[in-house]
Image (cartoon, grey):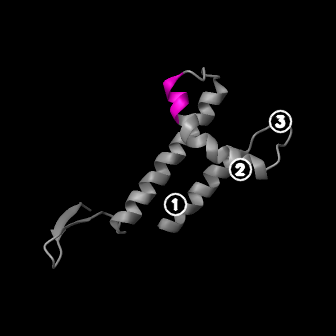
């Protein structure tokens, strides 16, 4: 399938994406996928213990950490392991599935 550029009855340009879905749905799905990637980067950076001054870590911490903190308030730690990224990724995957 190919992306088609068409117009509607009011003369506005529209874009038909392959696989269907509205433009808003596709953008939301893309944002959820990008956020999931940021969560994975945050986890990997914590494993290799990158300095908090690292620009990539500062960005990922600023974007992801507030959500992880909220999950940690509800989710107990088990044996010193932090499952909040896992819970966040599952939640993002469920939202992504709802979008189609």
User: Which residue is tagged 3?
Assistant: 80
The label nearer to you, 1 versus 2, is 2
Residue 3 lies, in percent from the top left, at 24, 60
Measure the C-alpha gap from mark 3 to mark 2.
Answer: 15 Å
* Label 3 SS: loop
- Indicate which disc, 1 or 2, sits on the residue closer to the N terminus: 2
In the image, farthest residue toward the left = 11
Q: Residue at x 56, y 37 (%)?
A: 62
Which stretch did the figure color magenta? 54-59
Q: Which class describes the residues within 10 Å of circle 1: few (<14), some (14-19), or many (20+)?
A: some
Q: Which class describes the residues within 10 Å of circle 2: few (<14), some (14-19), or many (20+)?
A: some
User: Which residue is tagged 1?
Assistant: 96
* Label 1 SS: helix
Q: Is residue 50 above or below residue 29?
A: above
Q: Picture quarter containing residue 46?
A: top right
Q: Is residue 69 left or right of residue 34?
A: right
């Amino acid at each position: 399938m190919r992306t088609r550029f068409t117009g509607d009855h009011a003369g506005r340009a529209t874009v038909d994406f392959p696989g269907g879905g509205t433009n808003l749905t596709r953008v939301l799905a893309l944002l959820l996928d990008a956020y999931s990637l940021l969560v994975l980067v945050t986890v990997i950076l914590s494993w290799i213990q990158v300095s908090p001054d690292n620009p990539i870590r500062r960005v990922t911490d600023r974007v992801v950490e507030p959500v992880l903190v909220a999950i940690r308030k509800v989710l107990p730690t088990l044996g010193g392991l932090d499952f909040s990224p896992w819970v966040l990724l599952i939640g993002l995957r469920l939202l992504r599935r709802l979008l189609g």
